[in-house]
Amino acid sequence: MKKQLKVSLIGNIPIVLICFLLVSSLSVLSNALYDFNMRNSMSQEYHQDIVVVGIDDKSLKENGAWPWDRSKYIPLIENLENAGAKVIAFDVMFNEAGANAESDKKLAETLGKYKNIIFPAQAVFEGGSYDFDNTSTAYHPKNGPIEAKGLTSSLELFGKVTQTAHINADLDKDGVIRNTFLQVKVPNSAAPLPSMAVKAAEIAGVDVTSQLDKYPNKEMAIRYDLLFSDFQTIPFVDVVNKAPKLKDRIVLVGFTANGFENDDGKTPIEKKTKLIYVHANIINQLINDSHIKDAGIGLTRLLIAVMIALALLLTWLLRPTYSVIAVFVLLAIALGGQYWLFASQGLFVNVVNPIAALLLTFLVNISIKTYFETKQKNYITKQFGRYISPELVKEIAASDQEIKLGGTSKELTVLFLDVRGFTPLSEKLSPEEVVGFLNMMFDLITERALANHGTIDKFIGDAAMILYNAPLDVQHHPYYAVKSAFEIQKGMEKVRADVLEKYGVTIAVGIGINTGQVVVGNIGSYLRVDYTAIGDNVNTAARIESNTQPNQVLVSEATYELTKDYFEYNCIGEKMMKGKSVPVKLYEVLGIVKAPA
C-alpha cells in the first residue's frame, strides 16, 4: 500500500502542475463549449424595434452594379424618415468620394435635415487592417477601451451632418465574433468612439451608460439570441419604391447580397452570416439588457483542484466499474451544470480544463491501480495456483480483499491423509518408479480435493494435509471435505488392485477429518512464509487419521454433527488421543446420502 501511495503521488504531481499551468491551453475546446451553449440557449424572441434594410440581390439587379450613385440613398432616407424610423444606421462605408460630386452634395444636404442617422467609421489597429484585424497586438488597458492607431471615417461633408460610430469586429483567434468593442479610443479625440450598436441604442433611448459601466475595458460578450433569418429584412429597393410602416424602429442598412465577402462573418450560432446581423444582435442585447458573464480563472482553478481530488477518491475508493460510472456522472453534472448557468444566469463557467483534469487524473491513477492489482493477482495466482482449484484462484484474484500477512482465526475443516504400505512398496521400486507412483496417487488426491473446493496445504512424503474454507469462504465446507475423502477412497480401489497385481504389495489410505477454529494464514518468518493452518483442531485431525484402519475415513463429532444429514455414518466409539484430556467420539463414513440444498 505504501508503494502504491508513493507511485500515485509521483504520478499525480505532474498532473496537478500541468492542469494549473496550462489553464488556457484548451481554448479551442472551451470556445466550442461556449458556442454550443450559445446555439442551444437562444431565445429567438424577435425584438420588433429592429429592422434590417438589405442591399440584396434584388436591389443590385434593379439599381445596377456596386457602387451606386449616392443619389440612390436619398429616397431611401426620406422614406425611412417619413415612415417614422427612430434610428437609421448604415453599415456601408462612405469614406471615398463618389463618381458624381453633385450626388454627394445632395446626399449631404438630405442627411443634414435629420439628427438620427449614423454613418460608420473603422478604427485602424496594428497592421492597418479594419474589420477582420487581429487586435491581440493592440494596446488594450484593463480600465478603458482599446486604443486604435488611426480612424477611417466618412467624407467630411457626410461626417459633419451625421452621427459617427465604429463598425469594427472583435475577432477571436479562430475568427469567430464572440465579443464586441463597445467603445474604441481613437487619436485626436478626447471622447471614445462608440460602436454602431451602442450609438443606435442610445439614440433609441436605451440607457447604455449603465451598461457601459459594467465593462471597465468596454469589451462585451455578445448574447446571440437571433439567427439572421429571425430578423425582419426588407430589400433596399422595396423601401425606395414604397415607404413601409416603421414608426419608432431602429433601421440598419447593410449588405445581405451574396458576393460581398468583406461583410461575411462567423459567429457562435452561424458559420456564415452578414455582419449587419451581428450589429442587430448587439442592439437587441442592449435593449434587453442581457449579458454574458465569465466566471473567471479563479473558479476554473478551484474546479480543477476539486476534480483532481474527486478523481483520486473515485479511483482508489471504488471498484473500477463503479469509478468509471462515477466519472461519467461527474462529466454529465459538470457539462449540464455549466449549461444551466449559461442559459439561466448568463454565466459561462469554463469546465473544459476541470474536465481534462478529471479525466487525466483518473486515467493515470486507474492505470497505477490496475498495475498493482494485476501484480497482486499474479502473485495470488502464482502462490495458490498449484494448491487450490482454478475457480477459487479466480475468485481470490477477483476479490477486493487483500490476503493478510499473519494469521486469522477461522472455522476450517482439516483433512489428513496417509498412505499405508508405502514403505514395503518403495523397497520394490526404483526411485523413478517411486516418484511415478506418488505422482499418480497425488494426482487422484489433488483432483478430488480441488473439485470439492479444497486447498492443498502440503504433501509430506506419502501424506497430505488439505484445508476447506480457506483462504476464501466455502459454504458447506465440512460436506465437501467428507465428500473428497469418500471419493478418494473410491478412486484408490483401482490403484490398490493395480499395485497388488503388479507388485504383490497391499496399500491403503487412512483419512481423518475434523472441523473447528484454527489459525490460518501466511505463517513463518520474513525469509520463509507458508500458507497453512495451525492449532488444536489441526492436531486433532492428524490424531484422528492415525487412528484409522486401512481404507477408512473417520470424522470427529464436530464434523459429524455438521454433515450427518448428507452421509451414512457408523459410530465407532470414543478414542483417547495424545494431547487430549477427554476422549474423542469418532464416526466412520459409509456412504453418501445426499448433497446440501
Image (cartoon, grey):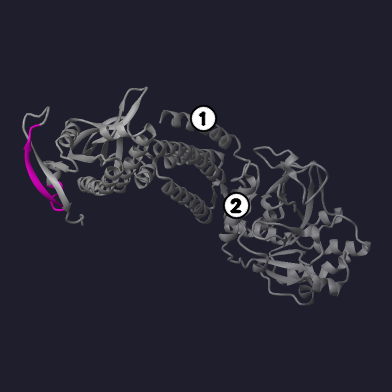
Q: Is residue 182 visible?
A: yes
Quadrant position of the C terminus in the picture: bottom left
Q: Amino acid at mark 1?
A: Ile
Q: Is residue 591 above or below residue 446?
A: below
Q: Compared to 382, does 36 lie above or below? A: below
Closer to the camera, 590 or 368? Answer: 590
Q: Is residue 376 left or right of residue 126?
A: left
Specify whether residue 306 is painted magenta.
Answer: no
Q: Which residue is mark 2?
A: 34
- The answer to whether residue 471 shows anywhere in this view is no
Residue 504 is situated, as x and y percent measured from the top left of the image, at 26, 41
How many angstroms separate mark 1 from mark 2 (CA)?
Answer: 34 Å
Q: Which residues are magenta?
A: 561-576
Residue 48, x across and y down, in percent: 62, 68
Amino acid type of the residue tagged 2 in the rendering: Tyr
Q: Farthest residue in the bottom direction? A: 242
Element type where label 2 sits in the image: helix
405, 239: nearer the viewer: 405
- The picture quadrant where one finds residue 485 is top left
Which secondary structure, mark 1? helix
- Between residues 8 and 415, which one lies in front from this camera angle? 415
Q: Is residue 581 left or right of residue 499?
A: left
Q: Which mark is residue 10?
A: 1
Is 14 located above or below residue 478 in the figure?
above
The label number, if any, that marks residue 477 in the structure image: none
Rate crowding at label 2 as few (under 14), some (14 to 19) or many (20 or more) other CA atoms within 10 Å. Answer: some
**Relative side of 134 to 594, left or right:** right
Few, some or many residues within 10 Å of mark 1 (<14, 14–19, 20+): few
Q: Nearer the viewer, mark 1 or mark 2?
A: 1
Residue at image coords 82%, 57% = 93
